[in-house]
Amino acid sequence: MVTEINEPAAASTFPLTLGHVWEDRCRKTPNATFLIEDDISFSYKQVDQLSEQAKLLLQQYRVNSADVVGIQLTTSVIYVALIIACFKCEVTVLPLNPHLDREEAAYIIKKIEPAVIFTDEKNNTLMNLAASHQLSYQAKPLTFAEHTLFALRQLDNTVTSLADVRAAQPDDIGDRSAVILCTSGTTSFSKGSILSHKNVLYSELQFNRVYDINAADILILPSGFYHAIGFHHGIISTILAGSTLVLMPHYSSAEFRKLIARYHCTYLVTVPTVIYDVLDWYTKKSSLTRIISGGALLSSDLLLRAKKVGLPIYNIYGLTESVPFLCTSPAYFKMHHGCTTAGYSIAGMEVKLISSKAAVASPNTMGEIIVRGPTVFKGYYHDEQETKKALTQNGWFRTGDLGHFTTDQALVVDGRIKDTIIRGGENISAYIVERYLLSHPEIKEAAVIGISDQRLGERIGAYIVMKPAQRPLSLTEVKTFFKQQHIAKKFWPEKVTVLSALPKTSSGKIKKYLLN
């Protein structure tokens, strides 16, 4: 018996592209405010005019729909205009993290080989790599909308003929590549996930429906466009709803609070670290009506704090390869009194659990989460081996995450398969230990890894960050807390290290490989 959530979509074709959706939005609400940056409002029409200038820029570099265009800029209106220009030219856009280190930047560019990369002097890692001949690109300055940018062009770039381009494209325009988003790279270098127009649009149409995102909403974005939260839930969701997006180039808790109050922002899509900051000052007088959380573990302590002040936090689950396919709906959240991260898949997506290649059907039995449907990516760019590992022949994506069904068949995510500690032959979920640690009233963040041990194979190592004004906890104190909570001894940490901060990716995920 296979336990699944929802039926797959009947239609196999999707006759829309992101360019078509943008054109439609500009026709419907040209004068509505789309973006706000540095106290300046930009209408959909104004951003469209900027994107036309950006389109001319792309044409100067003779890019075509077989090409990938990289963009490595700080969050800005200029960045959005370049992305929309890529939609119009039907080229695949590669949003790049401006904080990439030299090694990772070189790896990504050599792997994906964008035809041209737009950056600025604030993000000079790529220019330094090109100048030192570690990348076969040449940087040239240009002026765009009164901003000085740099275009890095491949030295050996050859122009692909239109006939070759058309022959390589899928017949269904919705299945053509729209964006390459790099995975978070918590265990290794990033992989480039190829997402089609259908992948992105289907995801955000369902996202807007579940959370009632509409033209009256105002979102503030503390995430970059190189991450699914920024690209999908920031740019695309806003365009589909005809709503407003407040841009924030650099996150600071104090500035974030000011901007929310100034622009009467109605909702957030962000990571738990930012939510923690918001709950320090939130009152019911705030314009915020809801928070949608993704990217990292949402602790029960955070949910309880939010419940006390009456601010709902809805959990979404997905990966860069399938964004998102599971949502805690407002109705389900209310039914569970505001204290759940469980959810159901969005319409048209199939989700099931497997263990040793057999389906898991019974509640509270852990298995690997696999998913199939319109949001699942096309594959990893220039990486057939990793694609074959991730995608089965019949279209299932193996997430590498563990989960279990509740008695009402909602899905709870239990952590990564690779986050399993094997201690004396027994498998112990690092996620479960982290969840217990986060229930301690003085612990703000926690990460658990396996520490090599000659006798047992691995022991449980915990890295914790204390809440403000709290003194560091010792291993003995942590064990005493676990004992008082009647937590099974197999979950007790055997080493505790207190840190001022955990190493994280730009999307808020913990880089566990740096802890051991």
Image: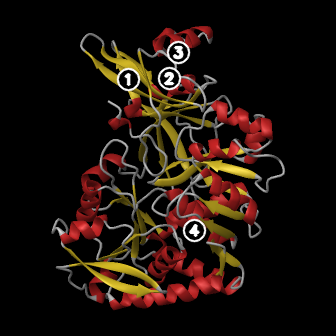
Q: Is residue 66 visible?
A: no
Three-letter residue code for mark 2: Val
Is 237 or 480 nearer to us in this picture?
Answer: 480
Q: Which mark is residue 182?
A: none
The mark nearer the N terminus, 1 or 4, is: 4
Q: Residue furthest right?
A: 285
Q: Which mark is residue 235?
A: 4
State the CA–CA distance, disc 2 to disc 1: 10 Å
- Mark 2–mark 1 CB contact (< 8 Å): yes
Given this view, does label 4 or label 3 mark the residue nearer the observer? 3
- Mark 4–mark 3 CB contact (< 8 Å): no
Near mark 4 (Cα within 10 A), the count class, few <14, some 14-19 or many ≥20, is many
Three-letter residue code for mark 1: Ile
Q: Is residue 382 visible?
A: yes
Three-letter residue code for mark 3: Val
State the CA–CA distance, disc 4 to disc 3: 43 Å
Q: Which mark is residue 421?
A: 1
State the CA–CA distance, disc 4 to disc 2: 36 Å
Which residue bears the numbered disc 3? 478
Placement of 19 over or under 403, stated as above or below: below
| Residue located at (40% from left, 50% from top) | 184
